Structure formats: structure tokens, C-alpha cells
Image (cartoon, grey):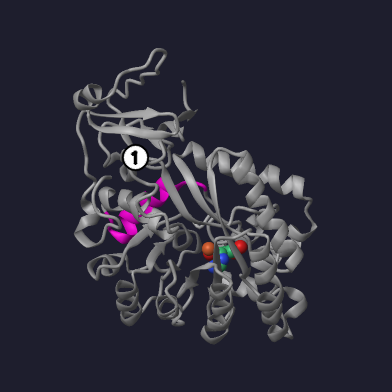
């Protein structure tokens, strides 16, 4: 994955593949990458140094999941069944289910239990080759519960192998107690939550669900302006259920990413291409909600930086498998294996404002590496529903698979 950062248009097809390659690691960092014989010539194997014969394995950078909502307790299979029987996601939300159901549950659940349940999800992600995730709050929706959620993310980042990049999402929904007074909830986000979160340095990003029945474009502009002023970088849930203009707003405000984009308009696509805002596409959400799929090809053709993510959450996409997203992207977005690999490594790094710092196998970068049980990288979308990650190396240590 050496070469351009981000990968746009036809560049997404360029993996910088090295046949018979080798990677040398010292401590937590990559020391050399290239043809095996060249790497061997460049480094002295220290005594006791560990050599892994990758044999016929494909070796890639650790995957980056740039959009997750992992902190929750109760799962929502009841709603899943309701959808199977014909209800829509929006109908369930209107009736008090959806995000608000997860909020009621998260507020009641003890921190220790939430940590334990979230940690299990993180370990599953790691087993699928994911070494870094972006993690959102947004099931608290009160100052106290949002802080609780972000502190859980902080705690897990310190104690678990996988890296977590924290995002504050107090504007995920209007909670039950403010349904008839949304203005007051918006004031609480702006005047209480954003200052409290930034004071405690608990979030790098601020995200919002900008959607007709959630936060309007004007409300989103106000909330996100406050977040930006407080020093947070911006992300948007945009144009997920309808074309509401969220992507244009994300571009206008210089957001790092705009996510979902199922109903993005032509002008939204042009705006993202121009601003350099990364489009984070979430095929698992379309799959799970049986909705339309984002116009990925059109975005790629127009030079938008495209990343892929799971959207792991208890409602619209309950999965920890980024490789499965690669299969869904192949069949529904018509993205090739190479394009998808770019979308979960180099471009996903850009979606979390770490372009060129993670997501590539390059000298000096953290040694986050996956060995896949396949002889050709194109097997990744094609051989689906199984876990092909054989070994996962995080900062130079083998954390999954036999040592
Ligand atoms: O990204 N769109 C908003 N938020 C989540 C769904 C959260 C939920 O249903 O709990 C999403 O799809
Ligand atoms: Fe989401």
C-alpha cells in the first residue's frame, strides 16, 4: 500500500503489490518493506529475532474501521425481526425504538458491564484483522451518559490491543425527555456537552445524525460550528435515509468525513470531491436495512476519496466484520478487491485524519500487519462468510494466531 494518500479514482486499484515480499519490524515499527531478498540485505537479524515464514499468505496493513458505535449493552434483535416482518427503521424509531431504546438501556447499565461487553466486540474486530477503529458515543444523550460512554472508549483504548479514536456524538438523536423541546436539547449539546467533552479531552471528532427526522441541516450547522470552535474535527452521518443536504454541509464545514451517503445528490458528490472530505460508505447498513446502496462508482469516478466501514451498532448494522463489507462492496458497489483494500487501509486512515500515518506498510509506520490465509488478495471478497485473517500483528506483537 505504498504510493498515493489518499487513493482516488483509478489510484484505488493500485495496491503497490510486492510479490515474494518481506517486512522487517523493530519494536513497534516497520523497519523495511520490499522483496524478501532486499529486506534481508537491509537488516541484520538480531539474536532471538522472530522470523515468520508467511509462505503463500497475503500480507496487508492492519485494517481500519473508520465508523463504529461499539459502546452499548442490550442488542436489538426484536427490531431486526420487526423489520423482517415489514416495519421500516424509521417507523421503529418514531415509535420509541431504535437509537432511543439503546439510550434508555445504556444509561441504566453499569460501566463495568459496558466495558466487558464492548471489549468482547473489540476482540472480535481484531480477529478479523482490524487494528484501529473510530468509536462513537451517542447512546448516552445526556452530559453524564455521553461522558460515561467516552470514558469507556478511553479506558478500552488504554487496556485493549486495538486502537480506538474517540468521537463525541451527543447529536445522535433527540432523547425521550426532550422530544417536545428539541431546542433545549440542542442548547445542552452546545453549552454543556461540547465544553465538558473538550475540557476532559475525551473526543477528537464530533459527529451528528443530519437527517430530516433527526437534526436538520440548519441545526447541524449550529451544533457543528460549536464543536469546530471548541477544537473538534468533524464527521457527519449524511444522506442516509433521504437526500437532506448533509454532504454539502459536511463539505462546506471542512469535515474530515461524510458517512452513509445512500441518497447523496450529484451536487453532494461534487462538493465532497472538491473539499476532499472522505466518503465513508457502509454497505452493511444497506444490507441489514434492505435499503438502497450508496452510488460508490459515481463517487469514485468523480474523484471522491472513498473508505468502507462496518458502522458496527446494535440497530442498523450489527457486525464486526470489515472483510464482509468488502464482499458487500464487491457485489453492490461493484468495487474490486483492490479498490476495497484501499478503502479499508490508506483511505480509511484519511477518514480518521491519519492519512500516511497508519494503513500502509511503509518504513517508520506502526507495525500493524495482517497475514491472510489466501494466496491471492482477490479471494478476500470472493471467499465470504469465513474469517481469513490468520495472524494479526499490532505494533510489532503477534496478537492473533499462533506465535
Ligand atoms: O449509523 N444513523 C445513525 N446511527 C446509526 C444507527 C444507530 C442505531 O440504530 O442504533 C447508523 O446507522
Ligand atoms: Fe453510524
> Magenta segment, principal secondary structure?
helix
The answer to which quarter of the image holds residue 122 is: top right
* Image coords of residue 212 (percent x, y): 54, 82
For the point 45% across and 63% down, which residue is it? Answer: 286
Q: Residues within 10 Å of mark 1 (few under 14, many from 20)?
A: some
The answer to which quarter of the image holds residue 396 is: top left
Is residue 28 found left or right of 383 in the rendered image? right
* Viewer-nearest residue: 213 or 164: 164
* Image coords of residue 104 (percent x, y): 75, 64
For the point 42% across and 76% down, which residue is it? Answer: 247
* Viewer-nearest residue: 128 or 142: 142
Is residue 368 found left or right of 213 in the rendered image? left
For the point 75% across and 59% down, which residue is it? Answer: 105
Residue 51 vertical placement versus 250 (above, below): above
Direction top: furthest residue: 47
Q: SS at mark 1?
A: loop
Residue 85, can we see it?
A: no
Residue 359, can we see it?
A: yes
Can you identify the residue that label 1 sits on?
383
Q: Which residues are magenta?
A: 320-335
Is residue 45 found left or right of 353 in the rendered image? left
For the point 30% across and 67% down, which residue is it? Answer: 304
Residue 129 vertical placement versus 216 (above, below): above
Q: Quadrant of the N terminus?
A: top left
- Magenta run includes residue 334: yes
Residue 252 vertical placement versus 386 (above, below): below
* Image coords of residue 145 (percent x, y): 74, 62
* Image coords of residue 202 (percent x, y): 63, 58
Q: How many marks can you see? A: 1
Amino acid at each position: 500500500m505504498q504510493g498515493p494518500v489518499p487513493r482516488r479514482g483509478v489510484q484505488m486499484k493500485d495496491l503497490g503489490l510486492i510479490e515474494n515480499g518481506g517486512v522487517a519490524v523493530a519494536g513497534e515499527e516497520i523497519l523495511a518493506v520490499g522483496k524478501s531478498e532486499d529486506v534481508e540485505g537491509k537488516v541484520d537479524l538480531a539474536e532471538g529475532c522472530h522470523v515468520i515464514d508467511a509462505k503463500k499468505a497475503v500480507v496487508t496493513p492492519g485494517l481500519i474501521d473508520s465508523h463504529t458505535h461499539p459502546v452499548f449493552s442490550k442488542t436489538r434483535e426484536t427490531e431486526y425481526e420487526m423489520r423482517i416482518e415489514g416495519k421500516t427503521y424509521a417507523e421503529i424509531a418514531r415509535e420509541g425504538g431504535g437509537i432511543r431504546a439503546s439510550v434508555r438501556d445504556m444509561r441504566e447499565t453499569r460501566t463495568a458491564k459496558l466495558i466487558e461487553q464492548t471489549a468482547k466486540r473489540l476482540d472480535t474486530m481484531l480477529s478479523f484483522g482490524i487494528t484501529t477503529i473510530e468509536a462513537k458515543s451517542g447512546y448516552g444523550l445526556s452530559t453524564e451518559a455521553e461522558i460515561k460512554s467516552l470514558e469507556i472508549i478511553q479506558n478500552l483504548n488504554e487496556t485493549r490491543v486495538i486502537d480506538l479514536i474517540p468521537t463525541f456524538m451527543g447529536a445522535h438523536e433527540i432523547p425521550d425527555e426532550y422530544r417536545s423541546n428539541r431546542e433545549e436539547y440542542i442548547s445542552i449539546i452546545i453549552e454543556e456537552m461540547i465544553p465538558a467533552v473538550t475540557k476532559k479531552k475525551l473526543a477528537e471528532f464530533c459527529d451528528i445524525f443530519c437527517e430530516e427526522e433527526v437534526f436538520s441541516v440548519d441545526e447541524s450547522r449550529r451544533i457543528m460550528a460549536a464543536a469546530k470552535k471548541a477544537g473538534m474535527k468533524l464527521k457527519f452521518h449524511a444522506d442516509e435515509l433521504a437526500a437532506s443536504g448533509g454532504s454539502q454541509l459536511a463539505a462546506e464545514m471542512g469535515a474530515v468525513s461524510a458517512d452513509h451517503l445512500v441518497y447523496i445528490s450529484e451536487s453532494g458528490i461534487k462538493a465532497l470531491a472538491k473539499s476532499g472530505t472522505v466518503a465513508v460508505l457502509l454497505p452493511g447498513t444497506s444490507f441489514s436495512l434492505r435499503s438502497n446502496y450508496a452510488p460508490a462508482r459515481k463517487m469514485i469516478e468523480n474523484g471522491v476519496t472513498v473508505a468502507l466501514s462496518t458502522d458496527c451498532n446494535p440497530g442498523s448494522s450489527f457486525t464486526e466484520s470489515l472483510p464482509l463489507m468488502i464482499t458487500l462492496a464487491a457485489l453492490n458497489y461493484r468495487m474490486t478487491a483492490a479498490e476495497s483494500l484501499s478503502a479499508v487501509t490508506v483511505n480509511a486512515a484519511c477518514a480518521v485524519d491519519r492519512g500516511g500515518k497508519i494503513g500502509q506498510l511503509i518504513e517508520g509506520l506502526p507495525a500493524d500487519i495482517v497475514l491472510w490465509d489466501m494466496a491471492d488478495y482477490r479471494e478476500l471478497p470472493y471467499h465470504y462468510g469465513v474469517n481469513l485473517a490468520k495472524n494479526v500483528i499490532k505494533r510489532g506483537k503477534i496478537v492473533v494466531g499462533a506465535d
